[in-house]
Structures are given as structure tokens and as C-alpha cells.
Amino acid sequence: MGKRRDPVASNADRSTDLYEIADWEVRSRLDRFAHWLYHTGIWALRGMVILIALVILVLQVAFGSLGALGVQPLFAGLAALSAVPALLLALYIWRADVTSSEPLTLLVGTFLLGVLFAGFAGLLNVTLGDPVQSIGSGFGLFEPAGLFFFFYLVVGPVEESVKLLAVRLYPYRDDRFDAVIDGAVYGAAAGLGFATIENALYIVQNTETVNGTIQAINAGSDIAAVRALAGPGHVIYSAFAGYYLGLAKFNPDDAGPIILKGLLIATLIHATYNALSGPVTVVLSEFYGVSQFTAFLGFVVVYDALFGLLLFRKLNAYRRAYQQAHQVTDSSPDEIEQAEFEP
């Protein structure tokens, strides 16, 4: 659908001045003030969101578990190592961008916003988790149902939304975000940031009560290994959502439904992973007589490989279309005409 125009503007001569009749542009002082006020308000709102996220992170460092990262460099090292698989996957998606390479400033900024906005997700998960699980389980009558609702109505939507928010607030508005596939790249960067801080929280929370350095190293290493497996999932989920955000940028008339579709896809993949990982791990462990870690490893590899393949097929489809479009563009008119009429 093209841009809708007022009937006066559609039928008037181009030389006719329709300012504040059927058209508008910045002319008067009041126009300039309204234009400035609107854009300043948008920037202020974005800044306020980032500031609130920063305050939450500072509070987590000062009074919560994250403060241990500064006291125990071991935990920070384990958190960094646990993020390596997610980093490698994000780099692969970055390399899959057949258009111009994305600038480091936008990638790092998106990564940092992914780290910051994880605080929003943690706060909302804690706030909404208990009531949703309580109601979903029939007030304790069937606990698995409560977890099901928690994963699909809270964890999935909340975490995928805050990661997508990191992309929407920063790189999306930049002119260098100039292709649909860029959304997947920045989505992957946001997912990497989210996974990194989430890994750090899990490692600290599961080792802060352990006494002794050796015991802490053993416990932290175990958690880091598990989180290293879970991290790439965040990159995959948010790359899907980011791709659709990129699609929305270049299809503004349908931007809302497109963004919602991307969020629904990311949410369903994420929530299904959470819902299946526990029970499937137990079943595989019992059925094959292997450790739960081995069973979990098998589940994660298969699950991430499945949806990673679907993501890469989408990226490859874009690559083929891009290359085909450029082959046509680079061909001379005579070559195109000859190709069209060759038997």
C-alpha cells in the first residue's frame, strides 16, 4: 500500500501551496519548536529507559549478586568463557550479512543495551512469575501447568521484548541500518549481551554460598558449562525477532504486525526450549542411562541446531535474493534484453 494522500493534495497542481491545508512542513517558529519538542521528547524517553536500566544494574552490583564479579575475578572469567559459544554464533550471523559490514559502534552499543535491559527482564520475571504460576497451576493443584504459563506468558515474551528493545532504541534509527538482514545481526548482538549478563548471574547465584576456592571453582565451572550451552539460544531467538524488525523498517505500512510476528516466533522458540529442557533431560537420562548433563547437552545441540538451521535458511534466502538483484543491476541493458529473448 502506497502513502495515503488527502484528496485535495492528490488532485491539486504541484505549484499550489497547501501548507496546513492538506500538507505540512517546518516553516514558522512554532513549527520549529513543535518539531524540536517532539524529537527532544523522543530522545529524552529513550534516555530515561536507558537510565532506569543502568540504575537497576548498579543496584544489582552494589546490593545483589553481581557485586561478586568484582570481588571474585574467577566468576567474571567463568562468565566470559560461558559466553564464547554465543559469541561465535553471533559472529557467524554477522559474517552472513551479505550487505555492508555493520559498524563496530552500533554492534557494541547494541550488545551493551542487551546487557542493561536484562535487568528489566529480571524484574518483570520476578514480579509476574509468582502470580502467573499460581493462577496457571490452579493455585497449586497442578504445578507443571503453572510453569507452562510462566514460560509462555512471562519469560518468553518479556525476555524477547527487552532484547528487541535494545535494537529498536539504538541501531534501528541509524541510517547505517540499511538492509533487512541487519536486523538479524543486531538482534544477535542484543542476544549476546543478554546471555552474557544472564550467565554471570547464574554463575554467581549458584556459587556464592559455596565454601572454599576449589569447591567454588568446581561449582562455577559446572554452571558455566551449562550456561555455555544455553547462551546460543538467546542469539538465535533474538536474531529471528531482529530480522522481522528489519523487515518492518522497510515495510512501514505493516510494521506493527511484522514486528509482532517476529516476537511471536522468538517467544515460542524460547518458551518451548524452557518448557522442554527439564522434562526431556530427565527422560533422556533415564532412558539412555547417561548423566543429566550429557542428556541436556544432547537436547540443546539438537534444539539449537534445528532452529539455527531455520534461521540460516532465512539468511541464505536473503543472500540469494541480494546476489540475484545485484547481478541484474550490474548487467547492461543489452545483456538483459538478450537474456530475455534468447530461445
Image (cartoon, rainbow, N blue to C red):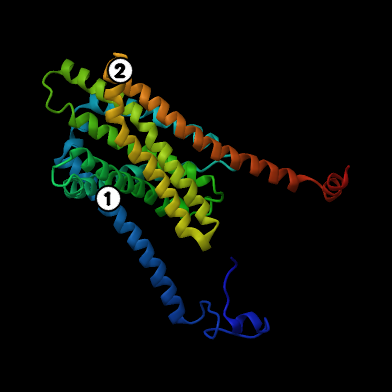
Indicate left or right for 143 with 240 as reference.
left
Q: Is residue 282 visible?
A: yes
The residue labelled by disc 1 is 53
**Dot 2, how many residues are within 10 Å of its Cα: few (below 14), some (14-19), or many (20+)?**
few
Q: Amino acid at mark 1?
A: Ala
Say if mark 2 contacts mark 1, CB within 8 Å: no
Indicate the position of residue 336 as horizontal and vertical percent values: 82, 47
Indicate left or right for 19 with 337 as reference.
left
Quadrant occupied by the N terminus: bottom right
**C-alpha distance separating marks 2 and 1:** 44 Å
User: From the viewer's perspective, is the residue at label 2 or at label 1 nearer?
Assistant: 2
Indicate left or right for 134 with 53 as reference.
left
Name the image quarter holding residue 217: top left
The number of callouts visible is 2
Residue drawn at (60%, 40%) of the image: 317
Please report whichever mark, 2 or 1, sits nearer to the chain's N-terminal start: 1
Q: Nearer the viewer, residue 257 or 140?
A: 140
Looking at the picture, does residue 89 appear above or below residue 343?
above
Disc number for residue 108: none
The residue labelled by disc 2 is 287
Q: Is residue 105 visible?
A: no
